[in-house]
Amino acid sequence: MFGKVVLFIGFAVLLFMLAGWFSNVVSESMSGLYSAQIARSFKQGMSWFIFSEVMFFGALFGALFYARMLSIPWLGGADNNAMTHEVLWPTFEAMWPLTTTPDGTTTQSMPWQGIPLTNTILLLLSSITLHMAHVSLEKDRRMALIVWLEITIVLAGFFLYYQGVEYAHAYADLGLTFQSGIYGNTFFLLTGFHGLHVLLGTIFLLVLLFRIAKDHFTPKDHFAFQAGSWYWHFVDVVWLCLFVFVYVL
């Protein structure tokens, strides 16, 4: 219960900070306070931010690959490690997903069919619809821009909903939890942090939709929309990597 309260408070603080930041940036931008130099700094800052996110997910994928390619084979007796294998875990079988923990707890792996495949299709479609929205903005087609962006937000909402359904299924039907050893930990860390990024990206898209309704962008001046597109396409690429390395392989 205490953990849920802390999580709720942390999420509320995050939303409050985002609301304040978006409010300040939008008001300053519409007041004409940003020069060309500041606009360049925004582009550089967004580029470095996405690079930092690449490093963040690179670390998480690194942990996954380390467990799969090094730790588990080593525990299974690879690299002339048969003696250590007999001492540490004689009954251990080097396989992935590792569905049996040292204390004998068993779980089931999450198949790639069903919800994971559906979510992959949803995110791929959302990248296409967001690109169409961007093209519409550049061609000054306001109604098409709004429609394509709304479709993107709806697809993002379905993704988040289905991920919630997937987690409920994992806990209730598969016994797949954070206590399910290295497989459960890497599964929830990678998909959970990605889900958080999808949520933040959806908030970003909603802010962009609000700004479009206020007619804040022009075909030549719309970096905020472009930054949102960069972030969303990055999130989609990360999911494709997740789908392949967490679900399929």
Image (spheres, rainbow, N blue to C red):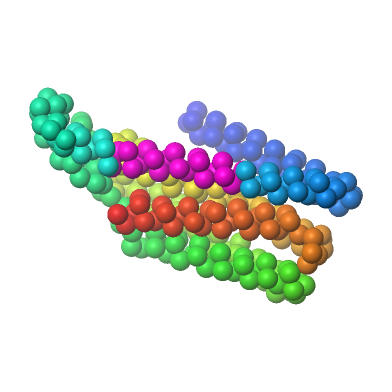
Whether residue 229 sits left or right of residue 57 in the image: it is right
Q: Nearer the viewer, residue 180 or 24?
A: 24
> Taking the image as drawn, is residue 198 in sight?
yes
Count of labels in the image:
0
Residue 46 screen position, x and y as percent: 66, 47
Residue 56 lies in the magenta-colored region: yes
User: In the displayed structure, would residue 125 be above or below residue 76?
Assistant: below
User: In the displayed structure, would residue 116 be above or below residue 172?
Assistant: below
Whether residue 84 sits left or right of residue 205 in the image: it is left
> Taking the image as drawn, is residue 180 in sight?
no
Q: Residue 186, located in which quarter of the rendered image?
A: top left
Name the residue located 76 percent from the left edge and 62 percent from the top edge.
212
Residue 134 screen position, x and y as percent: 67, 67
Q: Which residues are magenta?
A: 49-68
- Could you tell me what secondary structure mostly forms the magenta stretch? helix
User: In the displayed structure, would residue 42 be above or below residue 84?
Assistant: below
Q: Residue 75, located in which quarter of the rendered image?
A: top left
